[in-house]
Image (cartoon, rainbow, N blue to C red):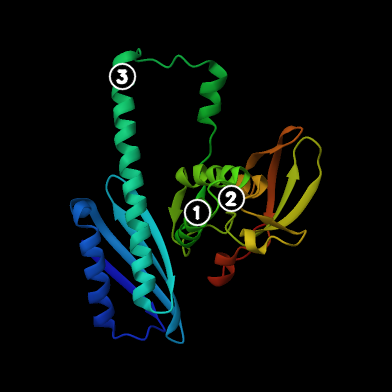
Amino acid sequence: MRLSIRAKHVDMEPTVLREYVAGRLGFALHRFRTGVDHIGVNVNCRNGHDCRCIIAVSLAPEGLVLGTGQGLAPQSAVDQAVARVIRRLKTRKGARLARRSRDGAAARATPPFDERPEHERRSAMKVKEILVTAEDMAQLRALIEDICTSHPRDDRQMKYARKLEAELDRARVVDARDIPSTVVTMNSWVQIREIDGGQEMGFQLVYPREASFPDKVSVLAPLGTAVLGYRVGDTFEWEVPAGRKRFQILSIAGQPEAAQHGRPAMK
């Protein structure tokens, strides 16, 4: 198991931080140890306090599992991130076992050919891959978890959270340095056009707490969830009260990752 740690403004000796992280992860991941390939840990503090931690565990067969934590000390941020990683691992493992059971039953009960109507098979093949940065994925997973914990009886909030979760489940996670500047990431400024009507609109894709202005769209809103991870030139569908409308992404005026790594905006 390979462990890499990046620390910034952390008021701990590097060897002490590494020993603490290794100890917490080693104890927490002992049941998954045989499948762990690599663990990346990023701890960032402000003046030694107000610390944030992101943990990315590469684990077979669950894939990449992310967890975030925040606290006044690096230890508390690490503890919180580890706890979230473990919860997600348990959830994924349970879902994998359930799928295996269903797949086995389906293989015994159905013929070895696809009986779905032609239009359903074509629709399934047209689903495009979306890309999400590792940091965005961790933040969005934490957002969903917070909603499920704080607002479990809010049907509207839970509906939006589940739709976002479904999109994240099919996303491919990419390092921020490698994400193409043509991809819609969090805090990107996007210009889209309605395909049938020709109307254009521009907005910034943001987290819910920042969506209080007309030109900002929350990632939890149907439009925000629909556009996340797509590229310039892609088309996507947005469900409105009157039905579904199709849109095309015309340009991305300000992708944070492109600006941070000196790549040009895509138009």
Tag 3–tag 1 contact (CB < 8 Å): no
Residue carrying label 2: 228
Distance CA(mark 2)–CA(mark 3): 34 Å
Could you tell me which secondary element the residue under label 2 belongs to?
A: loop
Whether residue 196 is situated above or below residue 122 in the rendered picture: below
Q: What residue is rendered at 37% in x and 73% in y?
A: 76
Tag 2–tag 3 contact (CB < 8 Å): no
x, y (%) of residue 266?
A: 64, 58
Q: Quadrant of residue 79?
A: bottom left
Q: Earlier in the sequence, mark 3 or mark 1?
A: 3
Q: Does 69 sit left or right of 213 as displayed?
A: left
Tag 1–tag 2 contact (CB < 8 Å): yes
Q: Disc 1 marks which amino acid?
A: Val
x, y (%) of residue 96?
A: 32, 38
- Quarter the C terminus occupies: bottom right
Q: Earlier in the sequence, mark 1 or mark 2?
A: 1
Q: Give the numbered dot on residue 221.
A: none
Mark 1 nearby-residue class (10 Å; few <14, some 14–19, many ≥20): many
Residue carrying label 3: 107
The front one of 126 and 70 is 70
Q: Earlier in the sequence, mark 2 or mark 3?
A: 3
Could you tell me which secondary element the residue under label 1 belongs to?
A: strand
Distance CA(mark 1)–CA(mark 2): 8 Å
Residue carrying label 1: 132
Q: What residue is rendered at 56% in x and 27% in y?
A: 123
- Quarter the N terminus occupies: bottom left
Whether residue 121 is situated above or below residue 253 in the rendered picture: above
The front one of 75 and 217 is 75
Distance CA(mark 3)–CA(mark 1): 33 Å
